[in-house]
Amino acid sequence: MSSAPLADLAARLRAFAKERDWDQFHSPKNLAMALVGEAGELAAEFQWLTEAQSQSLDETQLARVRAESADVLNYLVRLADKLGFDLIAAANEKIDVNERRYPAEKVRGSSKKYTDY
Amino acid sequence: MSSAPLADLAARLRAFAKERDWDQFHSPKNLAMALVGEAGELAAEFQWLTEAQSQSLDETQLARVRAESADVLNYLVRLADKLGFDLIAAANEKIDVNERRYPAEKVRGSSKKYTDY
Amino acid sequence: MSSAPLADLAARLRAFAKERDWDQFHSPKNLAMALVGEAGELAAEFQWLTEAQSQSLDETQLARVRAESADVLNYLVRLADKLGFDLIAAANEKIDVNERRYPAEKVRGSSKKYTDY
Amino acid sequence: MSSAPLADLAARLRAFAKERDWDQFHSPKNLAMALVGEAGELAAEFQWLTEAQSQSLDETQLARVRAESADVLNYLVRLADKLGFDLIAAANEKIDVNERRYPAEKVRGSSKKYTDY
């Protein structure tokens, strides 16, 4: 219920694949591969920008980043749908883990203290 | 409103970064870079599996895929939050585009007809 | 001396960047980001192919894979050149490490026994 | 002949896989997937560094970047070996193409003028 927007997306993507008989290509392995390809395109949007420039994208740049982000989300939702897990629950659990793993008082202001979160 | 679960995630991630004074590291450029790193870890979970094996993961494998997927979603949500766009709307617009771009009757059953969706 | 072909590539890429005044964009961070973007494009060439199909690419597919592989190599050579290390030596040392880490008699035929090499 | 160091690497990697009976896992699709995973790990080394910091890595950071770069090269060499193309020739041809595509006088100093090279 609380994940309704992602559940709606999953349903649309399921119908999209079914109508095109593309479900045969959507093994979890292939979806993960497609996802990392899209993530690479997303990264490529930023590769020659400074960090400061990445914080003030022009309209065209933002539209491209938005579209690539959408591709990543769609493959991620499709993957979770195929494997039957709840993305929102997974994301919240990961934050729970990271809150314990990176106590604020110990890691404050240091990027050395974490490699991911 | 309809994006409530992602808005909740975004708020948690914002607080998480703020408490650790990590916001300084979270330029859109850096977040995109972190995201593709996590997407690479997600892909790595599947690299030696056959497509069939990827469809019947054991409990350990599924837990790892779920955790890597969570990392990807968290960075994606954080990126969209930083850049001020609605991920759910972006994802739905992308599906709209793809429905026009890949008419079912023309591409049915062919992976050659699309490179992404 | 033994790395001559890569040294030649590095020199060409250095001149290429210098003539275009692009050296300013080629921080190791940016080069790594560009590299993973190209690696994503390389992966995307294979995303809807079966493993068997990936072993018998047609001429067009092979040309694309070859071009994307070239992009990856060029960024990798540029990165190593910027950071001053010998890629060939690094690659051989990694194989040395993996020969000890994955003794043939222990891991034979099992993909579970390794996640990378 | 001129590609000897890469040919030597390819031969070592071929023997490494054969002794472990891992050749069965090394379809071009799987190798491309493994490669992008390693490229993601390489990018991750830089994700929280500024561009300036990425230019003056400490010894530990450099060792990690070197090792990840080696992983990328090894998978790239293995992929090219499997598909039967010459990486050095491919890389040089790509530079030829880019010299024509990005004339120095037209693109000098502008990152907008290129998205890859």
Image: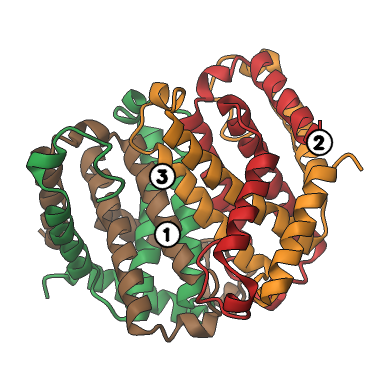
Chain colours: A green, B brown, C red, D orange
Residue B41: image tag:
1
Judged from the image, the secondary structure of the residue bearing numbered disc 2 is loop
Q: Nearer the viewer, residue D10 or C37?
A: D10
Disc 1 with disc 2 on a shared chain: no
Which of the 4 image quadrants contains residue B111?
bottom right
Q: Nearer the viewer, residue D53 or B84?
A: D53
Residue D108 appearing in the image: yes
Residue located at (57% from left, 67% from top): C102
Residue located at (34% from left, 30% from top): A54
Q: Does residue B89 appear left or right of residue C93 in this picture?
A: left
Classify C54 as above or below D48: below
Q: CA distance from mark 3 to mark 2?
A: 30 Å
Amino acid type shown at disc 2: Ser
Residue D44: image tag:
3
What chain letter is assigned to the residue under label 1?
A: B
Q: Position of residue D15 (x, y in %)?
A: 76, 65
